[in-house]
């Protein structure tokens, strides 16, 4: 039986052209399989990533709704663990903060809106925003200021990065009234944290292929505090000979950014200066609604808008620009190694702005937040 089957198979192969036919047929099947693998769309991620979401105050909840709508439409494998913490809406307590911290420690990644800090003193100097940063040790804030294709400003084709130390400096929450009518506010600068943020800036420049790091300071007046920061930056710079290092006084830096921002690449600075420069630089490319940002510790990453404004006057009016939060969400996806979904979201946002048909009021248009979000969703599959 076996002998007869072999003879029949041999006759069949010979009639079809011999062994060469069999090799060619096998090769064709192999090539077809390879082509089908190349042309097939990216596979869905094996697992769903859990991310902590903190909508914050002002238009934060509306912007987060835009993120959730876009993620749902794009089938992004992210599940949000949502928490509401607000000092102005009486939704802030130690228990809520601990729940939020517990979620962050489990998920390692968060997306958040601005938690508005009241100006009134109510017995606690450190705001919940500051306490959150300190408890998670979110020492490095990174804001990539990049011009949006298709939206013209006074300075086009901008591409610079602002890196800010955000756990000490002027935001140390150490104030007291020494005698009636005299307040002392302490600015804390330490060698350990100054070297840490300087090293972060140079490592960032190295990883991203950037050529220059500029330290921003006021050491001519604050000779000890900013002097130590400047000294630490200079020491770290010696470890990176391939990256050009400069320093500039904060007031001159503001003027130079307005006149000729192209001279800067990566800027590194203490806390207060970073807060000011973030907002100034955001204004160069379209305002607070278009610039994404992120904060890092050794373990955690938090994604938020680059210029932190609650935009309270826009609450409920459907006029806020979701661009910055959507681009922050895209950066978060890249951090999670969801490259395909990250490009899908960021490309859709930039495509809508470049087309120029759907723009919110801050960019000179008349579209609502919802209309902009729907335009982004429509461009996800393009």
Image (spheres, grey):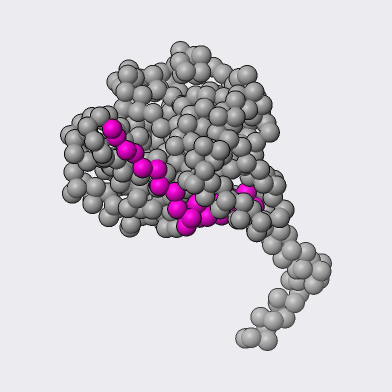
Residue in the image at 52% along x and 24% along y:
283
Q: Is residue 53 visible?
A: no
Tell whether 266 sits left or right of 12.
Answer: left
365, 233: nearer the viewer: 233
Query: Residue sitting at 64 percent across and 23 percent down?
Result: 259
Could you tell me if residue 93 is visible in this image?
yes
Q: Identify which residue is drawn at 62% across, 49% down.
A: 205
Instruction: Please identify the quarter of the rendering in which residue 179 is found.
Output: top left
Q: Is residue 40 above or below residue 255?
A: below
What's drawn in magenta, residue-wise?
182-207
How many numbered circles does the render carry?
0
Relative depth, front residue between 257 and 73: 257
281 on left or right of 212: left
Image position, residue 174 (x, y; %): 31, 43
Please state the horizontal and vertical placement of residue 268, each as a whole percent of the image.
55, 43
Point out the image quarter for the N terminus: bottom right
Q: Quadrant of residue 185?
A: top left
Q: Residue furthest front?
A: 179
Q: Is residue 152 above or below residue 17?
A: above
Question: In the rendered image of this protein, does residue 28 appear above or below residue 346?
Answer: below
Q: Residue 333, image x and y in percent?
A: 48, 46
Q: From the top left corner, tell me how far across and down residue 108 is, in percent.
A: 38, 55
Of 248 and 74, which appears nearest the observer? Answer: 248
Horizontal arrangement in the rendering, residue 324 relative to residue 36 (left or right): left
Q: Is residue 329 magenta?
A: no
Q: Quadrant of the C terminus?
A: top right
Does the magenta run of residues contain 205?
Answer: yes
Residue positioned 61% across, 37% down in the render: 248
Q: Dominant secondary structure of the magenta stretch?
A: helix
């Amino acid at each position: 039986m076996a002998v007869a089957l072999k003879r029949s198979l041999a006759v069949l192969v010979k009639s079809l052209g011999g062994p060469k036919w069999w090799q060619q047929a096998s090769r064709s099947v192999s090539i077809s399989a390879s082509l089908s693998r190349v042309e097939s769309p990216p596979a869905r991620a094996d697992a769903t990533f859990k991310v902590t979401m903190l909508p914050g105050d002002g238009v934060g909840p509306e912007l987060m709704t835009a993120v959730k709508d876009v993620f749902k439409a794009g089938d992004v494998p992210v599940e949000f663990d949502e928490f509401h913490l607000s000092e102005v809406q009486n939704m802030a307590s130690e228990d809520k903060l601990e729940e939020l911290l517990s979620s962050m420690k489990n998920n390692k990644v968060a997306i958040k809106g601005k938690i508005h800090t009241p100006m009134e003193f109510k017995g606690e100097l450190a705001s919940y925003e500051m306490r959150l940063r300190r408890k998670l040790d979110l020492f490095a804030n990174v804001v990539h200021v990049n011009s949006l294709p298709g939206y013209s400003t006074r300075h086009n084709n901008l591409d610079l990065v602002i890196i800010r130390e955000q756990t000490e400096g002027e935001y140390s929450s150490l104030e007291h009234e020494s005698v009636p009518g005299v307040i002392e506010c302490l600015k804390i600068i330490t060698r350990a944290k100054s070297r840490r943020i300087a090293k972060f800036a140079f490592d960032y420049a190295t990883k991203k292929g950037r050529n220059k790091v500029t330290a921003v300071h006021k050491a001519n007046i604050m000779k000890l505090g900013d002097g130590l920061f400047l000294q630490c930056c200079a020491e770290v710079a010696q470890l990176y000979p391939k990256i050009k290092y400069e320093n500039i006084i904060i007031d001159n830096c503001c003027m130079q950014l307005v006149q000729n921002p192209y001279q800067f690449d990566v800027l590194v600075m203490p806390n207060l200066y970073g807060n000011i420069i973030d907002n100034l630089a955001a204004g160069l490319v379209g305002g607070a609604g278009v610039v994404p940002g992120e904060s890092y510790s050794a373990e955690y990453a938090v994604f938020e808008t680059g210029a932190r404004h609650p935009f309270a006057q826009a609450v409920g009016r459907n006029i806020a620009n979701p661009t910055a939060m959507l681009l922050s969400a895209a950066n978060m996806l890249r951090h999670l190694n969801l490259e395909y979904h990250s490009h899908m979201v960021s490309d859709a946002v930039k495509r809508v702005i470049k087309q120029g048909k759907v723009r919110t009021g801050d960019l000179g248009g008349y579209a609502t937040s919802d209309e902009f979000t729907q335009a982004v969703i429509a461009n996800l599959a393009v």
